[in-house]
Image (tube, grey):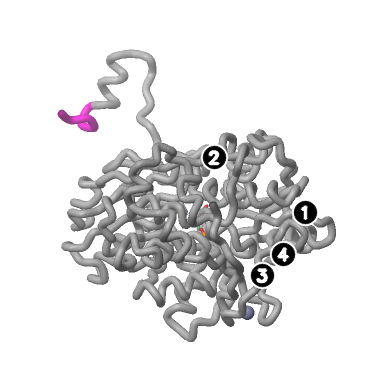
Amino acid sequence: MPHAVGLRCVRCAAEHAAPGAARPVRYACEACGGNLDVVYDYAAVRRELSRASLAADPDHRVWRYRALLPVDAGVDAERLNVSRTPLAAAPALGARLGLPSLWLKDETRHPSASLKDRASAITLAMARARGAEIVAGASTGNAASSLACLAARTGTRAVLFVPESIPSAKLAQILLFGATVIAVRGTYDQAADLCLAACERYGWYDRDTGRNPYTREGKKTAAFEILEQLGWRVPDWVVVSVGDGNILSGLHKGFTDLREVGLVDGIPRLLAVQAEHSDAVKRAFEGDGVIRAVSGVTIADSISVGLPRDGDAAVRALRESDGAAVAVTDDAILDAMRELARTEGLFAEPAAAAAVAGLELATREGRIREAETVVAVVTGSGLKDVASATRAAGAPLTTEPDLDALDEVVRGRIEA
Ligand SMILES: Cc1ncc(COP(=O)(O)O)c(C=O)c1O
Ligand SMILES: [Zn+2]
């Protein structure tokens, strides 16, 4: 049973009532315009949730954490079947990085192949509980393909705003799932502003990352799984790439939830990895905490964000977890795509590989040490951006269909 009791402003801590079925969805604090965070009655959750109750539950969908979710999916749980992803030891990559205890959380395995499915499951359940007929969202691509996928499963209409520059595979996913796509001639930030205005004008339910308080509630289930999969051992570091900052703030929420209900004693330090020119969260964290716009230009389209929509909560997550932030170049991201693929057989999109690039940098700089246990979250599949994968991958050897010609091609190139 859900134990969400209200909403609290991330910026000024003002408390707000949760939107009941009759009340409008609330996206921002009335006092200061800040994002809102879902508040739980942790004492009630403690009575319902324990390590033993989780161990006894065979349901591996996100709904196993219903005591700490804002909504019960009811009959929709069958269709909103977003489930546990693997957490695997990464000995070969760990050896390359000098990190013997490295783990990879493989979020490429979801229905639409990115971590965003966790958020879409929860927000769609919220929307459907409210009787919303049309659900909208703006996205660099993954949140949109995710919402389109799960909307198709539940027979919900979806309208999605994306920048016109969206990688073609993500666009194909969204269109194939039958959503209406509004390709905006502009940046992701402009698409997000337009989506917000459209939702206000047309009354659509807005799933927007970083404005809708319930996306964070979905993403936090990745943190729940990490702790369960590590046998309740809290890792020293969890590494994730950051655009709007909502995955980061979601992971932090998940770890603190489980600490508050007494399932673990502490939380991991969080390492935020941003792309070099898309580093507004890093700048704010290392400066005065105020998010200011940057250009947002990077090959890693999913983290190409000028003005992070969940920046306040992201900075808070870094501060409260005694975390750190790094920025990586596009070349380092392409290198990390190759490294991840060749050491661990994991095909990641640039934004997902960025986490590994940042981990490499933080380890080289001595911020993360050999003895520490690290979990890197691989947030989306390489199939989402084939052009970038091709850039990272290089070209094949080419031959005439003839053994002598092949001999010329392979000589000196393939050794036993
Ligand atoms: C694959 C992938 N990685 C990382 C991110 C960054 O998440 P956030 O924008 O919440 O910081 C996204 C967001 O679109 C993503 O799709
Ligand atoms: Zn406020």
Residue 150 lies in quadrant: top right
Task: Identify which residue, 212 or 310, lies in the foreground.
Answer: 212
> Which badge, 4 or 1, comes first in the chain's sequence?
4
Q: Residue at left 55%, top 55%?
A: 2
**What is the secondary structure assignment of the residue under circle 3?**
loop
Distance of label 4 from label 2 (alpha carbons): 24 Å
**Which SS type dominates the magenta stretch?**
loop
Q: Amino acid at mark 3?
A: Ala
Q: Quadrant of ligand 2?
A: bottom right
Task: Give the residue number, with chain letter if any, for mark 2.
Answer: 112
> Which badge, 4 or 2, comes first in the chain's sequence?
2
Residue depth check, mark 2 versus mark 1: number of the one nearer the observer: 1
Task: Give the residue number, with chain letter if any, for mark 3.
Answer: 17
What is the span of residues highlighted in magenta in the rendered image?
A: 411-416
> Which badge, 4 or 3, comes first in the chain's sequence?
3
- Residue 208 falls left or right of residue 185: left
Task: Give the residue number, with chain letter if any, for mark 1.
Answer: 204
Q: Are marks 4 and 2 in contact (CB under 8 Å)?
A: no
Residue 54: tell me if it is visible: yes
